[in-house]
Structure formats: C-alpha cells, structure tokens
Image (cartoon, rainbow, N blue to C red):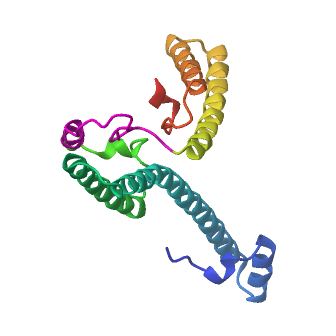
Amino acid sequence: MAYKHSSLMRLSDRDIHNKLLERNLPQIVCEEIKQTIKEQKEHRRKASLHARTMHLYWGELISPLVHERKIVRSIMRHKASIERGVALDAYLAVLNKLYDRLTILKTSSGLTPEQGHWVDYVPAHIKQRVIDLFEVIPHTPKAKAKIPFERRVPAIQHNKQLGRLQRRTIKELRNAESSHLVNPTKQGEDTINNIRLALDIMKRMTPTDAVPLTWHGLV
C-alpha cells in the first residue's frame, strides 16, 4: 500500500510537528496531515501484526507436513517390497501436492488456516486410496509399519503451541467466569464447563499430539 507523506512516516510525532512547522503550512492543514499519518501508522501496525500472525499459523501448519515428507523420503531409501514402494510413492505424491497447495494459500489467501492440522486438508477419498495401498503391504516381523496421515507434530512445536493455547484459554476462562458472576446464564455455565474440559484435555495430551488453534477444537 502506498502511504501519503511517506517521508514523515518514519518520524516521531514531535519530529513530524517540527517538519510541518518548517513548511509554514496552515494549522488546519498540519492537523490533517498529522491525523492522516497517525491513521496510516496504525494501519501499518495492524498489517504488520496480521502478516506475522499469518506467517506463524501457516508455518506451524506446514512444518509437520515438511517433517512427514522427510520421514517418508528417509524410509524410501531402504529396500522394500513392491507394495511398500507403491504405497510410499503414492503417499509422497499426496504430501508434495498438498505442500504446494498450502504454500500458495499461505502467500495469497491473507486468512488464517481453517484447519488445525495438515491432514485435515486431504480429501477423505484421497486418504482412503493411500491407506488401502498401505494395508496390502506384506507384514515384516519386528519392523515398524508406517502409518499414513497421522495427526502428529514435532514435540518442540507441540510444546510451543500448547503453551500458547493454554495461556489464551485460561484468559478466556477468567473472562467467562467474570461475566457469569455478573449475569449468570445456562449458556455461560456451559461455556465455562467446556473451557475447563478443554484445559483438562490439554493436560493429558501427548508430546506429539496436534494442537488446535482454539480450545473449541478439543471439545
């Protein structure tokens, strides 16, 4: 976005005032310029915050997908049955196509992810086709079978997302409890109970569980 008076945007309010005085502009014009710059700075701040938020949420959605692709590629380096090779090829093709799609959404949509995990972006019939291919792989004793489309995330990412969700949810619980004290309703009571349930579920999550964007995704 092109801003008016862009040369003044980087200055403090005091410096803007002094610069305008040097131009000998009418007072009303100076005030209009100041107001315009103030509004533009606020717009830029919100746009920057939105961009950082989008980068964070889309990055956290795509990161486990990238991790899963690395795992599949690593598995494919080892000799295996024809059935296993076919299943892994098909799975990797789905992962690659989804990565391209999510990358485009990240850069062009301007919206937060609608789903909390990359698995949710794969159509059910596509998942089933791949799952069917994995189910016909001959069993190998003592070998750990690869399970496609697991709702897992790296432990480091899980801890970061869970901590953020817990903080937001606790704050929302306090607000809901305060509102309920002032105006008790059945809906308010249900909300409080659901939030408490979500917090309890968070305590029992494993280190690689996918973490939703809000507590609603847990209940």
Q: Position of residue 193 (x, y in %)?
A: 55, 15
Residue toward you, 48 or 155: 155
Q: Describe residue 72's horizontal placement relative to residue 131 as left or right.
A: right
Please provide the residue range marked out in magenta: 127-153
Q: Describe residue 132's horizontal placement relative to residue 164 as left or right.
A: left
Q: Position of residue 211 (x, y in %)?
A: 51, 37
In the image, residue 172 above or below residue 16: above
Q: Position of residue 212 (x, y in %)?
A: 48, 37
Indicate whether residue 192 is drawn in magenta: no
Give me the residue at 62% from left, 35% from top.
168
Q: Looking at this rendering, what residue extends furthest in the front direction?
A: 141
Residue 184, located in which quarter of the rendered image? top right
Q: Looking at this rendering, what residue extends furthest in the bottom direction?
A: 23
Give me the residue at 33% from left, 61% from top.
100
In the image, residue 96 above or below residue 119: below
In the image, residue 87 above or below residue 32: above
Residue toward you, 111 or 80: 80
Residue 183, located in which quarter of the rendered image? top right
Residue toward you, 148 or 35: 148
Give me the residue at 23% from left, 40% from top.
137
The number of numbered badges drawn on the structure is: 0
